């Protein structure tokens, strides 16, 4: 998370001669602030999802460890895709790269859970209801993120706004009417 915030640089003091100049320089950083919020929420959601899964894991094996490392590798790419999106916020390709990063994280966290279940690594008290809840949460979130990415056909800002609403719904439990019906 600290790598992402480092992408928000302090404005160059050279051309700044007034409060208005400083304000304009700060406002020019708004795409970076928006994508920082976006990525902070993404990382928080993935962190919570992984912690929830690990809470229900009784033991691990080498394959599970490699799946976890693959998940972390996808997450480690987030500073790049975030920076790309911040730099080219109105470009669909930059948004697609960001979404692809989220998709990779989601696919891998799903693979971790599916493997753990198949390999018998899940605690016995984590019954079918827990498994269904975890699976549904990952699949619905990925569907909503994909829909959000598709909204870039209309406008990348519309797409980003939808993705932020999805993330706020998951991270803060805001209960946004249409989204919360799908996620509950």
Image: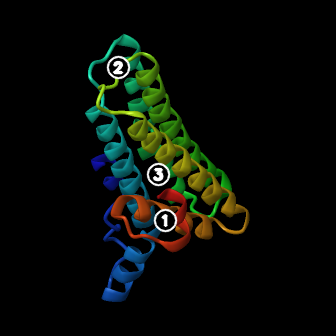
Which residue shows up at 36% across the image and 82% down it? 23
Question: In this image, 11 relative to 117: left or right?
Answer: left
Front residue of 46/61: it is 61
Give the residue at mark 1. Answer: 180
Q: Position of residue 181 (x, y in %)?
A: 52, 65
Which element type, helix, strand or loop, lies under badge 1?
helix
Which residue shows up at 34% across the image and 71% down it? 14
Give the residue at mark 2. Answer: 121
Query: Looking at the image, is mark 2 or mark 3 earlier in the sequence?
Result: 3
Whether the residues at callouts 1 and 3 have beta carbons within 8 Å, the answer is no
Quick one: label 2, few (<14), some, or many (20+) residues within 10 Å?
A: some
Which element type, helix, strand or loop, lies under badge 3?
helix
Q: How many marks?
A: 3
Q: CA distance from mark 1 to mark 3?
A: 26 Å
Q: Position of residue 12 (x, y in %)?
A: 34, 67
Question: In this image, 78 relative to 57: left or right?
Answer: right
Give the residue at mark 3. Answer: 82
Which residue shows up at 37% across the image and 48% down it? 43
């Amino acid at each position: 998370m600290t790598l992402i915030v480092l992408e928000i640089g302090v404005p160059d003091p050279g051309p700044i001669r007034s409060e208005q100049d400083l304000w304009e320089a700060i406002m020019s950083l708004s795409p970076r602030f928006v994508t920082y919020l976006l990525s902070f929420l993404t990382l928080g959601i993935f962190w919570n999802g992984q912690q929830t899964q690990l809470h229900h894991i009784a033991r691990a094996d080498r394959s599970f460890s490699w799946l976890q490392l693959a998940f972390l590798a996808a997450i480690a790419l987030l500073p790049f895709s975030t920076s790309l999106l911040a730099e080219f916020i109105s470009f669909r390709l930059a948004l697609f790269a960001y979404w692809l990063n989220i998709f990779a994280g989601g696919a891998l966290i799903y693979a971790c859970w599916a493997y753990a279940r198949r390999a018998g690594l899940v605690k016995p008290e984590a019954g079918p209801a827990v498994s269904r809840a975890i699976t549904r949460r990952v699949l619905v979130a990925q569907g909503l993120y994909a829909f959000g990415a598709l909204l870039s056909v209309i406008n990348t800002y519309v797409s980003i706004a939808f993705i932020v609403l999805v993330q706020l719904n998951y991270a803060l439990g805001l209960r946004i009417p249409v989204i919360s019906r799908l996620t509950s």
